[in-house]
Every structure is written in C-alpha cells, then in structure tokens.
Image (cartoon, rainbow, N blue to C red):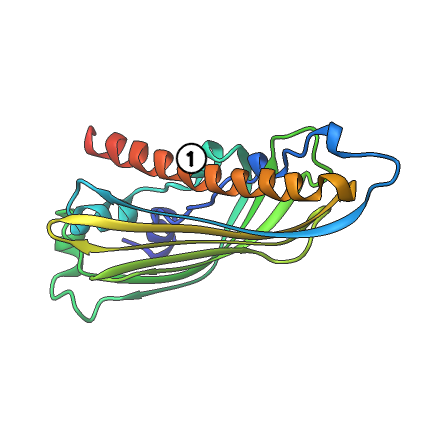
Amino acid sequence: MSIRKRSAAIGTGWVIGLASLFAIPATFISLSSAENRITVRGETNFVLDVDFEEFRQNLLKANATTSIVENGGMTLVDERVVSLRIDLSKDPRPLRNALAGKSKSEVFATKRLIVALDDPQLSTKQLELEQHVKIQLASIYICTKSTESSGELLSYETTLEAKKSNGQTEVSLSVDMTIDVRVSPVFLSQAESRVQQGANQAVLDQEKAIRQLVSNLDSK
C-alpha cells in the first residue's frame, strides 16, 4: 500500500465536540457583566468489549475522522496529513499481514484539522486543530489541541488513550478547555458549573460515538 493510500486509511479523527461546552444561558448575562476566564476538564474511562488488536486494526484501516467529528456537533472542513511515519520493523510480512487485517506496523502521524462549529450562538465559527497520533502494538495515544485562541476559546485539548485489558480494550478520554465568558459576577459560579457539565457531557457523547463506530465496523 502506498504511503498516500495508507495515510488516508488511518482512523485518527478522535475529536471531542465543543458545541455543548458554551451553553451559557442569557439570564446569566447583565449590563454589569464582566469577562471571566473559566477552565474545565472532563474525563471518562470505559472498557470496550472488543480485543485491543481488533480495535487497533480498525483504526489502521478505517478513517474515523468525519464520523467522530460530526458526532461531536462539528463539521469537518479540511483534513491534512502533516507528517507520517510507519514502522514496519516488527512486521515480518507487512503487505501480507495488512491484506489479512493482521498488520504489526506502528503508525506515528501529525494531522491538521479545520472544523466548523454547528452552534449559531458561538462567535467561534471555525477552529484549527493539530493532532498527534501514536498507534502502537500495545497502546494508542491521540492528542488533539487548538493551534491558537479563537473567539471565546482560549485553549482546547483532548486526548484518547487505549490499551489492552483482559481480552478487551480499556479507553480513557479527556478534554481540557479554557474559555472567556461575559457573565454577571452573581452568576459566575453557575456559569462555571454549566461549562463543567458541558465538558462532562462532551466526553460521554464521545464515548457513545466511539462505541457506535466500533459497532459499525464490527458489523461490516
């Protein structure tokens, strides 16, 4: 398989949605409101009832970017592979194993994503993300972060980690975000709570999307 074809087949688009994280009710805003910086973290851990190697093979052969992004309330505008390295040193028959769905190759990639946020209430309409991917024989690590601030969003980073777990796959998801919100001091704590709830819900929605993706791949 050529590098170009192989890079298109790497399912590395694990992006936790942003739309639900900015839901600050209008009742929190008043003429005396001021800009406040809110930092939140959402995280979840779960186990997929699928062998890690099968999960890894699915990532190697299926482009998950569009599915995951759109499940997160965003639309993928552009996707570009910046760098790609495929380590075949642990695979004695790389082509044969790849065709048989038993590839032992390890993939290291960097991608640039541009996504559109599907929420008319946000001043941030598009976001550029950089994604670092390591798909190895015993673990998977994918980190996606904003390249610069955009509108209310000062920083945004998500991670996905997966590893073997007694014939299954253990997955950890997290999202870290800092935003500026204009809200009355009286309602600041409520605003912080609302944004934190959004972060918590975002990782749960992403878990649902990953489970659905695995289910769809298994049914093919």
Q: Answer with the quarter of the image where residue 50 lies.
A: top left
What residue is drawn where x is 24% and y is 50%? 170
How many numbered callouts? Answer: 1
**Does 214 appear above or below 143?**
above
User: Residue 198: x percent and y percent?
Assistant: 54, 38
Which residue is at the front of the view, 87 or 161? 161
- The residue positioned farthest toward the bottom in the image shown: 89
Other residues around mark 1 within 10 Å, as few (<14) / some (14–19) / many (≥20): some
Q: Which residue is mark 1?
A: 205
**Does 171 appear above or below 147?**
above
User: Residue 122: x percent and y percent?
Assistant: 70, 35
Q: Which quadrant would the C terminus be assigned to in this image?
A: top left
**Does 123 appear above or below 169?**
above
User: Residue 210: x percent and y percent?
Assistant: 33, 38
Q: Answer with the quarter of the image where residue 182 lies.
A: top right
Which residue is at the front of the view, 102 or 183? 183
- The residue positioned farthest toward the right in the image shown: 31
User: Residue 112: x percent and y percent?
Assistant: 53, 54
Q: Mark 1: which secondary structure? A: helix
Q: Answer with the quarter of the image where residue 33 lies.
A: top right
Q: What type is the residue that disc 1 sits on?
A: Asp
**Does 25 appear above or below 128?**
above
What residue is drawn where x is 12% and y is 61%? 93
Which residue is at the front of the view, 168 or 42? 42
What residue is drawn where x is 64% and y is 30%? 119
